[in-house]
Amino acid sequence: MDPFSAEGELLNLHNHFHQGQFQEAVDFDTAGLSPENALPARVLSLRAQIALGQAEDVIADVQGEKEPELLAVSALAELAAGNESKAVTFAEGLAKDSGENSVVQVLAGTVLQAARNSEEALALLSKHQGNLEAVALIIQIQLQQNRTDLALKEVQAARRWAQDSLLVNLAESWVGLRMGGEKYQQAFYVFEELAQAAATSSVQSVISQAVAEIHLGRLDEAEAALQQATAKDPKQADLIVNNIVLNTIAGKDTTELKSTLTSVAPNHHFLTDIQEKSELFDKAATKYSAKAAA
Amino acid sequence: MASSSPNMLTKFESKSSRAKGIAFHPKRPWILVSLHSSTIQLWDYRMGTLIDRFEEHDGPVRGIDFHKTQPLFVSGGDDYKIKVWSYQTRRCLFTLNGHLDYVRTVFFHHELPWIISSSDDQTIRIWNWQNRSLICTMTGHNHYTMCAQFHPKDDLVVSASLDQSVRVWDISGLRKKHSAPTSMTFEDQMSRANQNQADMFGNTDAVVKFVLEGHDRGVNWVAFHPTLPLIVSAGDDRLVKLWRMSETKAWEVDTCRGHFQNASGCLFHPHQDLILSVGEDKTIRVWDLNKRTSVQSFKRENDRFWVIAAHPEINLFAAGHDNGVMVFKLERERPASAFYQNNLFFITKEKHVRSYDFQKNIESPTLLTLKKLGSPWVPPRTLSFNPAERAILVTSPADGGSYELINLPRDGTGAIDGADTKRGQGNSAVFVARNRFAVFNASNQQIDIKDLSNSTTKTIKPPHGTTDIYFGGTGNLLLITPSAVHLYDIQQKKSVAELAVSGVKYIVWSNDGLYAALLSKHNVTIVTKALEQVSTLHETIRIKSATWDDAGVLLYSTLNHIKYTLLNGDNGIVRTLDQTVYLVRVKARTVYCLDRNAKPKILNIDPTEYRFKMALVKRNYEEMLQIIKNSSLVGQSIISYLQKKGYPEIALQFVQDPQTRFELAIECGNLDVAVEMAKQLDKPKLWSRLTTEALAHGNHQIVEMTYQKLRQFDKLSFLYLSTGDEAKLGRMAKIAEHRGDFTARFQNALYLGDVTDRIQMFKEIDLYPLAFMTAKSHGLEDECESILEATGLTEEQITLPSMGSPLTPPKPVVQTFKANWPTKATSQSFFEKALLGQVDGLTLEDEPAAASNGLGFDDTGDEDLTNRNGNLEDADDDEDAAGWDMGDDIVPEVESDFVNVESTEAGGAASSEADLWARNSPLAADHVAGGSFETAMQLLNRQVGAVNFEPLKPRFLEIYEASKTYLPASAGLPPLINYVRRTVDETDPRKVLPIIPQDIESLATYDLQKGYKAMQSNKLEECAQIFKRMLFALLVNTVSSPSEVVEAKKLITSACEYSIAMAIELSRRNLGSNEEVAKSPEKLKRSLELSAYFTIPKLEVAHRQLTLVSALKSAWTNKNYNSALSFANRMLANGGNAKMLENARKTKAQCERNPNDTLEIEFDQFAEFDICAASHTPIYSGSPFEVCAFDGSKYHSKYKGTVCTVCEVCEVGKNGSGLKLVA
């Protein structure tokens, strides 16, 4: 039986993790679990630790372990710790040796994708046997490749066998935010439901809700949501970025937010992107000049 | 006495039955002709076409007239009827009945709604055509009245009758009665009514003023002089009589004798002191009004003349005769002229020789008068100039043709008679060398070459039938005969070349002397100096003149156009003309010409089109680039022109429409573009055309992609086979398997030499015998066994045919599929490269080196090719997978499989939504949001001439930053980027568009008010900043509807006005503190001026008041009471704050006591002016100025090309296509 299904012991842990409630996932009491679930629970807990930025601890924790699941965790931890090449070597090895292991698929797939090796990641993930995590990851990768059409197919297929599970809902919302129209509203409902219930709320879900609201053009609501998230964790990079976007749209000053972001996450995609565009602008602008000097 | 001139300048002739009445349309080139056959014809005499016929009269129509302003005309006929017609609706509006006999003439009144008619019933009647009533019957003549006309200004009528008298009638009573009704008492009305009845005989509305007797027979026609108190009449006594009248009396002045039959019509020349008359003696005669002597007469062989009419405006007449009408003019209107370098020499209407300097645009005073040349009424025909001697040679057609050789004085001192002149007989005379000229005499067919002392040095017999001579290059003459032009060498005395061109009238040499244009009435023939024909063209409208551009383009004028033709015969219209002109010179955008009054005129033209075509012909790519860059040369015509002329690759640069681009790309073999466009359009038809083209090029990578698009599996397999791509062939086999297409599978297996798959397939479709044979022939004994086992047979039971050797597919020798074959450099021209180069930031100056030699071409081509291939591969990889998912769902399940197969190898990424934005929208803001800054800049540059983008950087980045959100998704991966749309409800990827921050609404409600507030609180620098930011935000923005565009434009205008106002006031404040300013008179003057200018920009009224208060204050304190007064007046006119107004009123009162300025400043309160945004000085209306294409701020012309000081982005005077804010 799938340990993550509605009747499974690990449902809550699983949900905590995917809702972005990483601390709750770490704190999850694993003592009473049946022995076959001990390892998956440990893996999830370790992943939550990595998400919380404690990659070094995790590396130490899994040192010397031989299970492919834990090796995969260590690959992920190396990635999070900034040792990308090491992580990729790990992941590639695991993909070759234990490509059928679902944890390896997801974690190694994540590492490969993070290292911008989408093809290998997809190849690995496509081996999955009814693993929702892998499906969600595939969808995310496809979205990153701007293949909304493929992602949509993947979601629809998953929806057929996994029905109303959390990950399917999330993945569908991700796709929805790409498609737009009515899908914005549906995505919003999913995120809002998560964000506004105390048991499931997390910074991540509140940000997601705010993003959906930005896309819906409801700037005031989005601002309220982002404030709510700021109250929880003001240093979250994605939060700050979306705050910048929102303020820009509303025509407000973003200088302070930008400097905060630079200190929190100097390598954030937003900053590098803007930097690149700024250079592009300067380069493009030099092609034009007035015929006569003033 | 009468000197006859056989050369009547006939412009139009019609053939019909006898023409009895003629009327010119005052504006259009139309005449109405009423015929004896009851028809009324409407002709276009310029085109020579019959526009319409009106046939409702019964019997001859004698009277006809156009209304001056309305689309009406009136006719009167032998059916006693007067009909009023509309030529627009082409029908008779109504008929005026009343005359009891033939109607002879009808005329409209020049201002009142009246018609006057004369009739054989001896009456003259005046009708009101508005209420269609008879308002006056004038009786008195006791025979047929043949003609009656209104005076052009006064309340007079003149009439002629067969009773031998001419009568002048006073109709002021009639006007009084019928105009301006004042309130009348009942009694008045009664008496008026009674009076009317009494009028029947005791007429007071129209009374005879004078009776002019002098003709011995009936009088046929009579006419007033347009301005002088003169009357002319023509009668059956064959005389034309001139009469003069004063207030009280009228008398006969003189008689013009000459007609030897009844004189039937006469009139005064509208502009010159001439009388024209026609008669049954078949002549048209022209008389000198002052001397009453015959000036000219023209005789027709067989046709008696019945009527003559003059055009009211231009120099045209029409005469009606037994077989139709003729339209003619009395004299040539082409002023004789010649130009040398920068000077034009020409002869005015007054026969003065003048010159005109093209560089200074000044006309000289009269250099010389030619009063004595020829007869006074015949203008000189040609002028030839000799720069070495500063002499002119003038010919006149008078007295059988004569010429005069005159030295021009250095500078004009007024009317000098050509003292030292040499003259002689001749029809044409031209200088052929520095000290020789040729004179042609038509009567004895002889050309004399003369030296400057007018003695003949050589005599030439020209070819038979020569009509005219022209300069033919040094030492040569061009001789014109009716059917040919000869190039005649004077030294060798023989014709060295001959070209059959008929009817040449003028010859115009190009400035470099290499080409000449031969002009005939409807043809322009361009020849080389050796008289070899280069090109020829035909015009339906008459060609009047021509001149050469310095670049070798011929500009010629027709009656109503200036056109151009290139040497290769390509021609087109440059501009239309309101009136006929004679071109003399063209320099850049200016055409110099002489009009029919011999006045030099300057016309502006846009030479872009022919310059571009010229550059194209000469392959002058730099110039083409320059033109493309600097002008908005777009449009269907230029595209089709380029395509037609075989430059599809250049046309490609102008086209946006993907379909057309595709066609052009295919035509010029530019596969990259074709692929790009085909992807955009994605139509099977296009893909198959692309396939054909790519196959022809041998570009198998594109062929592969198109086959994929078209799902042509078999072709694809074969392509892979032929390119040796076994891996893909294998995949094709797999696909065939998925599709369950056994034929395809078999085929692929054959290609691959895959025996097992073939056997497997035969087994699957139960073709065991074939499976067995295949296995057997390839020696697969195990397989044979298993087949036998499956079918339950033994080998003995089967009879086998004899075996051949098994089929082995060829092995690829070269891995062709890895790269495209090196194909020939497709027609990627220098031009195209240069354009691309331009995008890459190459400056134009870099290119001539590459262009100057032909070799550079090939190199660049090759280099480019490799690049192209490289690019193509990339594109191909990207699109490999994408190719499959867009087609229709023939095999939906296989589809995704295939995609996976492909995408494991080639990246499956597609273009992001941001890329779509740029594709979906023509608006700069959307391109910015999509991150495509280069194209956005290009758009802005084209639209409003934006050149300085630096200030827009924050705006660009702001839009870009607002375009994407970051959605946290799976832990451990970067957030998902989503694209924020303004089209929230839109899901069609071809229609989605990005959000643009700071929309019009927020700018109008928030920023504008903020700006106003800053202004109100005197924070001018802040205010200036706010409006500048607004301009930036507006420049890169979008709106949702055309109505918002209007709003946006308003915002731009007011932001601009405020910006200028702030800049003026800030520069005033920067002059220094009050004390400093007060010390320096210069600064004080400037300060006062600036404070005055501050009131000029169109600010909100409340703010204008503030500017006025400030201006008033400084004017008052510096005792400039006059200015202060004007400010006070303006304040009072504006109204508003009571206290402020009270102050103004007080100041006004004080100023009025002494309305003088102590310090003269440049501020004319009464003049209309704008403020130059750069210099802050006035631009008075009427003086030239340049504008910024974006914000509309105005500049003195000298600021053209600088960056606009208001928006800081656009180039002043660079006209674009206009800012686009809505798609």
Image (cartoon, helix red, strand yellow):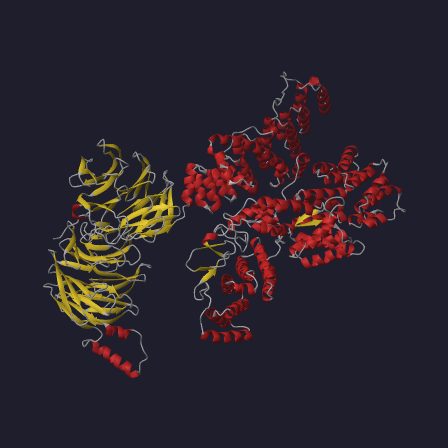
Decide which of A186, B922 is in the foreground and name it.
B922
Q: In the shown orientation, is residue B894 left or right of residue B386?
A: right
Q: Does residue A284 appear anywhere in the picture? A: yes
Q: Is residue B367 above or below residue B59?
A: above
Q: Position of residue B940 (x, y in %)?
A: 54, 49
Q: Residue at x 55, y 31 (%)?
A: B863
Which residue lies most toward the left here?
Answer: B216
Q: Residue at x 65, y 55 (%)?
A: A249
Which residue lies most toward the right here?
Answer: A31
Q: Position of residue B936 (x, y in %)?
A: 57, 48
Number of numbered labels in the structure image: 0
Q: Is residue B893 above or below residue B189?
A: above
Which quarter of the figure has residue A126?
top right
Q: Position of residue B396 (x, y in %)?
A: 20, 47
Which residue lies most toward the top here?
Answer: B802
Which quarter of the figure has residue B121?
bottom left
Which residue lies most toward the front here?
Answer: B1079
Q: In the shown orientation, is residue B689 left or right of residue B280?
A: right
Decide which of B745, A185 is in the foreground and name it.
A185
Q: Position of residue B322 (x, y in %)?
A: 17, 53
Q: Does residue A185 appear anywhere in the picture? A: no
Decide which of B1217, B757 is in the foreground and name it.
B1217
